[in-house]
Image (cartoon, rainbow, N blue to C red):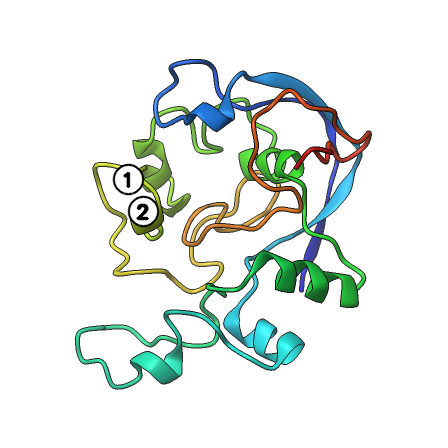
Amino acid sequence: IVLVLLPGGRFRMGSPEGAALSTAAEVPAHEIDLAPFLCSKFETTQGQWLRIAGTNPSRFRPDVYEETPLLDFDLTLAFPLTNVAHGEVVEAAARLELELPTEAQWEYAARGGTETAFWTGDAPRSVVVRRGGNTNASAWQNDTQLPFGDGAAIVTRVGAFAPNPFGLHDVIGNVCEWTLDRLCQYGGPVRAGDALREDA
């Protein structure tokens, strides 16, 4: 696991009312102060999880798709981990003396210090133009799907897309990420330093 020290600081979390591709859980946008923190440079791979937990619960994994002629790429253990429960990830991270980022830390990390909707810019198409992420890989899980593709059949190997300004890969798409706190409305109290929502 490669960790990157992020500088922290003040940033605007969430989306303005009526912003394209935003959801009700992302409003109102508000200021958050974060202390410096470590964040993984890459998504957790299936191979890493296999070594950590001894299992590979991923939906798209080599032993399931090795004989699938419809896929024209090699699905390896370098692909991202999926289908793992939040509690399992929190427990595994604790065994490694690590902690998942809070939602605020994750949004700050994913934006890479920018003030735009995506680290690549405000326009959704900027994600593909700048090779910033796998835009539709997890669209089946939610209703936000961009009206264009990036050429990936499903998920891609970890690190396949360009890093953001903080040097973090695959922060837009590929797979969804777990955070320490759960999704809930903004407005409740937050812990100083990492903005963990105490009501989540």
Q: Which mark is residue 15?
A: none
Residue 34: where, in percent of width, then height? 75, 30
Is 176 situated above or below 73? above
Classify residue 64 as left or right of residue 120. Answer: left
- Quadrant of res 63: bottom left
Q: Residue at x 44, y 33 (%)?
A: 120
Q: Residue at x 81, y 32 (%)?
A: 193
- Quadrant of res 153: bottom left
- Work out which quarter of the rendered image holds the C terminus and state it: top right
- Quadrant of res 155: bottom left
Asked if the residues shown at circle 2 and circle 1 are in contact, with their CB atoms under 8 angstroms apart, the answer is yes
Please tell me whether mark 2 sits on a helix, a strand or a loop. helix
In three-dimensional space, the C-alpha distance between marks 2 and 1, rounded to whole angstroms, equals 5 Å
Q: Residue at x 30, y 39 (%)?
A: 143
Task: Tell me how many marks there are.
Answer: 2
Residue receiving disc 1: 145
Classify residue 4 as left or right of residue 147. Answer: right
Residue 99: where, in percent of width, then height? 74, 53
Q: Which mark is residue 139?
A: 2
Task: Residue lying at the far left in this picture: please name it.
Answer: 70
Residue 11: where, in percent of width, then height? 65, 22
Q: Amino acid at mark 2?
A: Ala
The mark that comes first in sequence, 2 or 1, is 2
Task: Residue lying at the far front in this picture: please name it.
Answer: 199
Classify residue 76 as left or right of residue 40. Answer: left
Is 139 situated above or below 103? below
Q: Amino acid at mark 1?
A: Gln
- Work out which quarter of the rendered image holds the N terminus and state it: bottom right
Q: Residue at x 55, y 37 (%)?
A: 183
Q: Residues within 10 Å of mark 1 (few under 14, many from 20)?
A: some
Which residue is nearer to you in this view: 132 or 146? 146
Q: Residues within 10 Å of mark 2 (few under 14, many from 20)?
A: some
